Image (cartoon, rainbow, N blue to C red):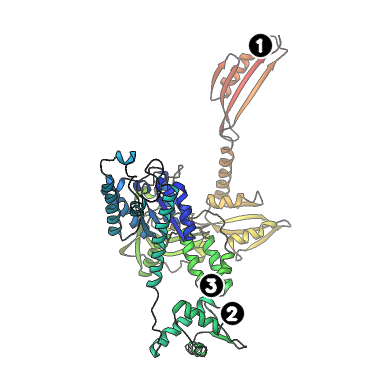
Amino acid sequence: MRILMLGNSFTFANDMPAMLAELLNAEVIHHTRGGARLAEQLNPKTKTGAKTQAALENEFWDYVVLQEMSNGPVTSRNSFLKNAGRLCAWIREEGATPLLFATWAYQKDSQAMAEMDISYDEMVQGLHDAYREAADQNDALIAEVGQKFYELADSQDLYAEDGQHPSETGSCLAAETIAAVIQADQEAKKAATTIEVDPNLNWNDIRLRVLYMYQLLLQHTDAEHQLTTNQIRNIMEKEHGISMHRTTVPGDIEMLKAAGFDVHARRSRQNKYYLENSNFELPELKILIDAVESSKFITEKKSRLLVEKLLKLTSEASAAKLKRNLHTSGRVRSANEKGYYIVDAINEAINAGKQISFYYTDFDGRKKQFLRNEGKPYIVSPYTMIWNGDYYYLVGWNHEQEETRTYRVDRILKTPDILNENAQPVTEDFDVARYTREVFRMYDNEEPQEVTLLCANEVMKGVLDKFGMDITVKKADPEHFRTKVKVCTSPTFYSWVFQWGGKVRIEGPEEAVTEYREMARKALNSTWKDLKTALIVFNKDNKDFSSIRRTIECWIQENTKQFKVRNGNMWECILHREDTNTDVVLSIAVYDISV
């Protein structure tokens, strides 16, 4: 169980989240700051709000606990109700259950209470009413911690010295109250999915019993984990309240086999049974789970949910084995939580033969997201979606540019609109496999062209990995081979060539050779842009030191773009290098040591 707590010092005092974690055997995370209001949790421009947004959108939570600033529900009731409502809606949208942590009035007769414009009883009632209204409006759970404080304050030391914050005993009471609400909710959810079975089974009940038997075998057994007759009887009694005679078990097993379920029985002194789950073998599930875990396109939260669903396709024992072998690499993942729905909308449009409209994004040098196409939506006839290089790509006809283009799905801002206009049909000669090979790495949008490569024999594996086994290769000399590939000559392709350190050379066409050289030159230039160098001249033998200074000044005036005289014997110059086409800061100092 995972619980997120949003609040302030009333929540984190005395490490109350740790108390709650121990009571529920759960993982409890808190996003808190002294004096924080719920409005701060909704504002992604604040540090706390940004953390909360990331946690809700990218992680899975069972419960999210909300605690407003201590007197906020009384002094700013409308604001509290509005922010509580927004948070509850958001929490439910992300699949969690909201729980309101109803706090307490300040200690009776304390300085803190005296500074309020209302009495102790009015604050107690005001907090109770506001939290209760918020819970009713949003169908949220509520932990009436404030009421517990009111009932026990005279008999227990619940407050810290300031009369506002809880003592350790008070925090413990809060944790216990919250835990009790969560436990009750868990029991209620379990009861809602449990069917009461009449212990006096008749013929109609047999159908229900057999379904329970199938569920039991599916959940608890496989070829390596079998159950005896008595073990089946015990589980049926414990989980469903059904008492079975030992002779009833084989009969129900035979009924399942007659219905086509692959139930096996091993005859021995104690007969053992298991269900052969033919949907997926364990290695197949492992491959699927690894694919989900390694995908950059799937967010951390969605990945966790998918893995949990995949684990339910096998027995508990096998699922436990798979869980022990799950390792996440901490790789960069997409932050677009709407990816699932974007893919679904595109797929629906392809099946319906309709155009789509969407906004496409990029990032500037400050990591700020902006809209491409001058903020206007793209109108595209979607052809297909391709998985390539850890990402989904949409391939379609761009109606404005009148050409086939590719778009990374996780960079589409939100779910595309499916338009009423029919999509432009895919041409008969459009080959997805060929298009994927030619549009190198999918995100290069230039027209592909044939490029001749001269490669060292040792890079053959890398070339085949990149272009496939169907390329034609010819021996160039004992140490090299030559091949022609159809690619988009873009920075992505040139980067691939560059990584081989000269072992892959572009021979043609000439435009590609020129482009590659220019890219390499610019990369070299970028390493010199900030270079500063110095020239120090010492005069020992020449008695005419002023002539040396004049000679240096003449050279500087003739050979530098600009210069400054720092003092009589020092200059700072901007020197342009023709070989690298860049500017270098050159400092020159001359010293006379002939005296």
**Res 554 → quadrant:** top right
Q: Residue 55 — which label?
A: none
Viewer-proximal residue among 493 and 252: 252
- Mark 3 or mark 2: name the one nearer the start of the chain: 2
Amino acid type shown at disc 3: Glu
Q: Which residue is mark 2?
A: 223
Relative to residue 374, is residue 388 depicted above or below? below
Does dot 3 land on a helix, a strand or a loop?
helix
Distance Cα–Cα, label 3 vs label 2: 13 Å
> Within 10 Å of the Cα at label 3, are there few (<14), some (14-19), or many (20+) other Cα atoms?
some
Distance Cα–Cα, label 3 vs label 1: 91 Å
Q: Which residue is mark 1?
A: 545
Amino acid type shown at disc 2: Ala
Q: Name the spot of residue 105 as percent of width and height, x first.
A: 32, 47
Comparing labels 1 and 2, the label whose residue is closer to the camera? 2
Apparent side of residue 512 relative to residue 89 in the rendered image (left or right): right
Residue 407 appearing in the image: no
Q: Name the spot of residue 277 as percent of width and height, x first.
A: 53, 79
Viewer-proximal residue among 419 and 23: 23
Does dot 2 land on a helix, a strand or a loop?
loop
Amino acid type shown at disc 1: Phe
Task: For the C terminus, give its image quadrant.
Answer: top right
- Find out whether the residues at labels 1 and 2 contact each other: C-beta distance under 8 Å: no
